[in-house]
Image (tube, rainbow, N blue to C red):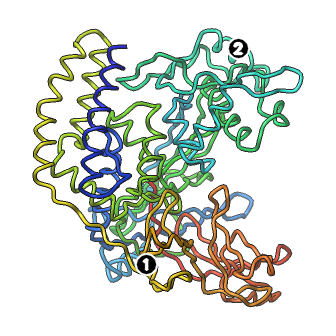
Amino acid sequence: MDAQQARRALDRLVGYKISPLLWAKVKKGLSAGRVQSVATRLVVEREQDIEDFIPEEYWDVTATALLPSARGRKTTFTLKLNTLDGKKAELHNQQEADAARQRIEQAHFAVYGIKLGEKRKLPAPPFTTSSLQQEAGRKLNFTTQKTMQVVQQLYEGIDLEGEGTQGIVTYIRTDSVRVSEEALNAVRAYIPERFGADYLPDVPNEFKGRRNAQDAHEAIRPTDINRTPESIKASLTKEQFQLYRLIYSRFLASQMKPALYDTQSMDVNGDGVGLRFYGEHKRFAGFTSVYEEGSDDVQEAAETTLPQFVEGSPVIMESAASVQHFTQPPARYTEASLVRMLEEKGIGRPSTYAPTITTIITRGYVMRENKRLFPTELGRMINSMMTEYFGPIVDTEFTAELEEQLDEVEEGQLDWHQVLRDFYPPFEKMLKNAEDAIEKVEIKDEPSDVICDKCGARMVYRVGRFGKFLACPNFPECRNTKPILNYIEAKCPQCGGRLLEKTSRKNRKFYGCEHYPDCDFVSWEMPVEEKCEKCGSYMTLKRSRKGETWHLCSNEKCRHRVAVASAPAEEEE
């Protein structure tokens, strides 16, 4: 209770003292907070790192080898250039890559060394609040706010047919991975019934929580392991079912045996050129038969076919290829990766992550586009002001250290009044200095080329609760506003009108005709100007996570595709 009182007082000191200053010096409606200002700073600094990044060129060279089999069939596998003349291969331009490729094509190779092994992949612990927000963002494309809204419904209770209203998940605001003995016994009885005894470990799997976990509640899990997602699907909305299935599968998998993989690494050498092969083959699925944790990183899967060679045997190279790459800047934050960063740095608590991210987006400090978080000009300005005049408040190490002090209060090692006494005097000096030093900032509206149809003035861009919009500069005499219309180059396939980029009620992007409702054309995928060469239907733009881009026919019976570009993908955090 003392720790909560201290946290509440600190948050109000920061928010109630700095926010009025921002109102007076910048504009009304702004706010600052002990956690939200740090979150904004993280997004701004990541964007600055991206802008300052200088890409460097490098090349990869791979070779395809043939493995004859006893039945006369041939299996191909891929090796990667590893060494040149005994040194690590580092190729910086096309000339070096071409030279390495030619050496591979001319050399005679033999197996130099083979290493066989086994890899165990352990299951992830059941969900905490932050890990649920991250995984729902990765797998279900939920925002942190949406995740908490839906899981709150599952916790408060669902009207199940034949059972009445039942809470189907445990308490949802927790940083603990601990599970009750009753739940462990239930899931350990369920696993052999459904999957067989081979999937049940001899003793329950135990997980270690993060160092500063309060451990006041269990991990997030289903209240009844026998209540499978499929058995209650009819009582759930689509979003409730998706999230419940995620929670259920994660908890079930957490108490299953690890997945086992046979691994093989092989060095192939010839005439000073060293190639390396690595592959793995899943021997026992274990928990992966139920659930695999998502990743924010784009990962290439290892080959699943393991070639059977003995040391000294010759290797026939079929071809060699070189691929140009450029080093990539750090990825912009998604909501999931920002939550992970806040948690890693010990900033905030599980219950604060969703409202913190929602606040900095609502205030206009950060904008979300294609799941990525970008700082706005207002966000940069506020962050610059906070960094200059309230440096310790937005310093990640200082904020994490303050959280540690609050943990000491919780453990009875520190008086909460002392935490406030240590915090307030220097904070009061910072506040007085800022009030004297900061001059009134005039935020000029960005003019547009749209004319107000009520008073004839040129409308300006403004930022509101739901993003940018067009407003008349003569407010309050003229209160005319308009949404910003984003047109795309393609024409409407039905009437030839212009197509608009729109947003659905569930915040999903789609494309519709400007002549709606007279023309009812809509498409979830962005139409392009090209027509399908096979059936004449309009084509749409598709892009993979790896940066591959192609045009896909909209006709379900055709679905002809044409590759148009290939660009380096922005790797996810």
Left/right placement of residue 391 relative to residue 375 reads left
Decide which of 539, 421 is in the foreground and name it: 421
Question: In the orientation shown, which residue stands out farthest toward the right?
Answer: 162
Which one is nearer the viewer's eye here, 43 or 132? 43
| Residue 186: numbered disc | 2
Residue at horizontal 67 percent and vertical 20 percent from the top: 200
Give the residue at mark 1.
106
Quarter location, residue 544: bottom right
Q: Residue at x 37, y 60 (%)?
A: 375
What amino acid type should be assigned to the residue bearing mark 1? Gln
Quarter-of-image position of residue 232: top right
Left or right of 138 in this view: 195:
right
Disc 2 residue type (three-letter): Ala
Q: Residues within 10 Å of mark 1 (few under 14, many from 20)?
A: few
Q: Residue at x 56, y 54 (%)?
A: 301
Name above or below for residue 166 compared with residue 570. above
Where residue 135 appears, x then y in whole percent?
56, 42
Earlier sequence position, callout 2 versus callout 1: 1
* Residue 568: % across, % down: 46, 71
Which residue, as the protein is rendered here, is positioned at the far front?
Answer: 477
Does residue 136 appear anywhere in the picture? yes
- The correct choice, above or below, for 277 with respect to 509 in the image is above
Residue 415 position, x and y percent, is 22, 12
Query: SS at mark 1?
Result: helix
> Where is residue 441, by image quadrant?
bottom left
* Cα gap from disc 2 to disc 1, whole angstroms: 63 Å
Nearer to the camera, 504 or 350:
504
What secondary structure is marked by label 2?
Answer: helix
State left or right for residue 333 relative to residue 87.
right
